[in-house]
Image (cartoon, helix red, strand yellow):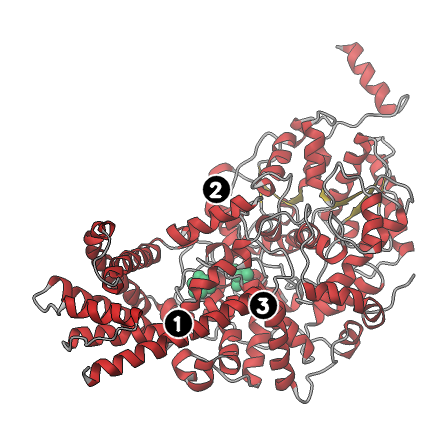
Amino acid sequence: MTGISIFFTVLFYLASIVFIVGMARKIYQYWVTPAPLKIPTAPTPLTKTGVYMRMAREVTLFESLFKSNKWTWLFGWMFHIGLFLVLIRHIRYFWPGEIPEIFLLTQPFKYAAFAMVIGLVGLIGRRIFVERVRYISAPSDYLMLLMLLIIGVSGVVMTFTTNHTDVVMVKDFASGLITFNWADMPTEIQWVIHLLMVIVLIAIFPISKLLHVPGIFFSPTRNQVDDARRRRHISPWALEQEANNDEKLGQTLGKDNN
Amino acid sequence: MADEYEVPELPTYIEIPDINEGIMDGEGPFKSSEEFQAPLGFPGEKVENWKEKAIDKMADLKSKYRSVQVFLDMCVKCGACTDKCHYFLGTSDPKNMPVARQDLFRSVYRRYFTFSGKYFPKLVGAKELDDEMLDDWYNYYHQCSQCRRCSVFCPYGIDTAEISMAAREVLDVVGVGQKYCNQILGKAVTVGNNLGLPEPALRDTLVDLEEEVEEDTGVPIKYPLDQKGSEILLVTPSADFFAEPHIDGLIGYGKVFHQDGVTWTLSSYASEAANFGMFIGSYDVMRKAALRIRKAALDLEVSRIIVGECGHAWRVAYSFWNTLSGVGSGASDEFALKLQNQLDSRYPQPQHIIEYTYNLIQEGKIEFDKSENDHRTVTFHDSCNVARATNMGGIPNGQFILPREVIKSVCNNYVDMERGTIMESTFCCGGGGGLLTDDLMEIRIKGAMPRMQALKEVEKSDGVDTLAAICAICKSQFTKVLPKFDFDPYMIVSVHQLVSDAIVLEKPEGSDSEVEESTEVTEE
Ligand code: SF4
Ligand code: SF4
């Protein structure tokens, strides 16, 4: 194997470990941190099914964002749906050997890359030119969009221009990562950059705002059923506090007249 | 005093302002002192090791509240919420944009609790917690009415109210409390209501009220206090006992109860529905206040608990009581079980007075002479806490439907304000979340602008001259700010004032008015 292939193979595994361990820790943290009070935001679902529907609409259609700001919605949705389709299409590279026929259907998904790139350009533009959004942006917010844009553009370059890379080699390399059957990767600059950015993004996932991906499923204003009167909702710490604290509460928080 | 502030002009539609950094910088509201801090268990002044204590408290809060932890992590700075806060629209101070308000807290969280913030603070906008930052917290977290409008529009439901409650709790713990809220809470958890009205004063007021109403209507309507064995315990904001226009709402509740023929009572021990514990973010204080109501319900042996017109009170009652004190179903401690046995399970517990009146209307148990309200054209202001954090009637969006149905049953002329400013998108009155104090008058006036703008539009297009609300804070706030925007301060009414004006009361036999009526009939 070439030095650069070894380097990226190692880097890929390191990033993956950071990703898996980091995400597991974060998700565990969200899981065990109780939401002590019922705080769903209107329009609230009154049943569990309602919550599933609401969540489904949020993650597939970005319902709240649509209500909020049509341009941000348009660019944001284009980017996310584009990324999603492109990712599905990428399965072929990681699949060891012949891909099942069904994946041939994903061939046209390559055009989704344009949606992704256009969306990203829109989002960057908004961040730079809308004063309010510029005010709340930190350098990392621009960098992250930039990285995604580089990933998108380098992908487009490899797919739609004559600057192709050796797809067979990419597939051997990528599927080799999965099967621990390591292989050399191509060395064209567009490919190397593409890969590097992806690896960085994977690594920073659990320590950045990319946590919105698992986070939304834990968002109490979105995932709670509005049934407080019918069902008692109480957190373990509050129950414990109730058991131990009642007397203390009486002593510390003012004295009753009665 | 308020006149010295520049009152925003009302545009025909709301434009998103250009940002003006630092325009609402300041000291914030009056600070609390030992006298008001101590009864709540908070230090009287900024403690020596405040920074350490604040960071500890942040760690504690984010481990107790999933909302805080998740919201701090997942904001993507998309900016969708930036133009949703009435305080930003009214002041143009960028720190009043919801995400920027959260960032005051988030930047500190990042600095002390995250890898990227510890090692690359500049890159991710992480900041030290210093005196300046704490001052900013105090100032800008008291320019948030915890109305949750931002949460509706955030793609992840990030609720700035949760962050502002957390920040206020941290401030309280290090001894930098707000006078207004903490002084009131002291009275609420000792005397039983926010005004500090003791039982005799309350009794006098109610006796006066009975006389007044009987004089007015010829019907001996009772406003009972501490009547053991009544069917219904009414818990209402104490403003209803004294303030205008609140008291006309209280008169209305009494008339409705009277027509239904139920026995009901107020409690002197729990004479307050409002619960400012929520505003300061303290679970303990909030619970303490809520427990008084449970105790009153047990002592008075009532079978139903009904809550009067108050926004955040209804949030606490509807969404939190069952959690805090087991009013509702499912709690298992001794008192809660006793209460569950005692309360009538055919009704939701607690119930809102609007739900109660609405049901009576549906059942045809009360009648109205709608023409009594013909001199008015009414619009309804959805109070944020009712609109965004509760439900009524157990039907989807019931909290928007029921009050409107009640209003439409009692008056002929009803118009809604623009859709983007009502229901779940309602604009706050500008005085919620513990901001209803004179030392915050500037932000109250400026924050009222978006609501006033929508009101101006229906005034122009439909001649609206009455603004109905079901929240004590909204009513007080509007009374103050309406005249600033060239409205009649008396145009704000309780929904139950409209009910009160139109309800047809059964007169007792042989009374004067009965005779008058019969003569009228013979004349015809
Ligand atoms: S809408 Fe939500 S995610 Fe977007 S900036 Fe505001 S708080 Fe952050
Ligand atoms: S909760 Fe209301 S007042 Fe507070 S930031 Fe959000 S919109 Fe503004």
Q: What is the chain identity of the residue bearing mark 3?
A: B
Spatial distance from mark 2 to mark 3, Cα to Cα?
A: 36 Å
Q: What is the chain identity of the residue bearing mark 2?
A: B
Same chain letter for marks 3 and 1: no
> Counting other residues with Cα less than 10 Å from the Cα at mark 2, is it few (<14), some (14-19), or many (20 or more)?
few
Query: In the image, what residue type sits under mark 2?
Result: Lys
Q: Residue furthest left?
A: A162
User: Residue B241, how many percent across, how many down?
Assistant: 79, 50
**At numbered mark 3, what does the secondary structure look like: helix, strand or loop?**
helix
Q: Which residue is mark 1?
A: A205
Query: In the image, what residue type sits under mark 1?
Result: Phe
Q: Which of B120/B390 is in front?
A: B120
Spatial distance from mark 3 to mark 1, Cα to Cα?
A: 27 Å
Q: CB atoms at circles 2 and 1 under 8 Å apart?
A: no
Q: Is mark 3 within 8 Å of ligand 2?
A: yes
In front of the other: label 3 or label 1? 1
Q: Which of A208/A70 is in front?
A: A208
Q: Which of B463/B346 is in front?
A: B346
- Residue at (68, 40) in percent of width and height: B354
> On the image, which quarter does residue B138 sit in?
bottom right
Q: Which residue is mark 2?
A: B460
- Residue at (52, 38) in percent of width and height: B463
Q: Give the numbered dot on residue B164.
A: 3
Same chain letter for marks 2 and 3: yes
> Counting other residues with Cα less than 10 Å from the Cα at mark 3, is it few (<14), some (14-19), or many (20 or more)?
many
Q: Which of B405/B222 is in front?
A: B405
**At numbered mark 2, what does the secondary structure look like: helix, strand or loop?**
helix
Query: In the image, what residue type sits under mark 3?
Result: Ser
Mark nearer the N terminus (2 vs 3):
3
User: Residue A78, how many percent across, how many down?
Assistant: 29, 56
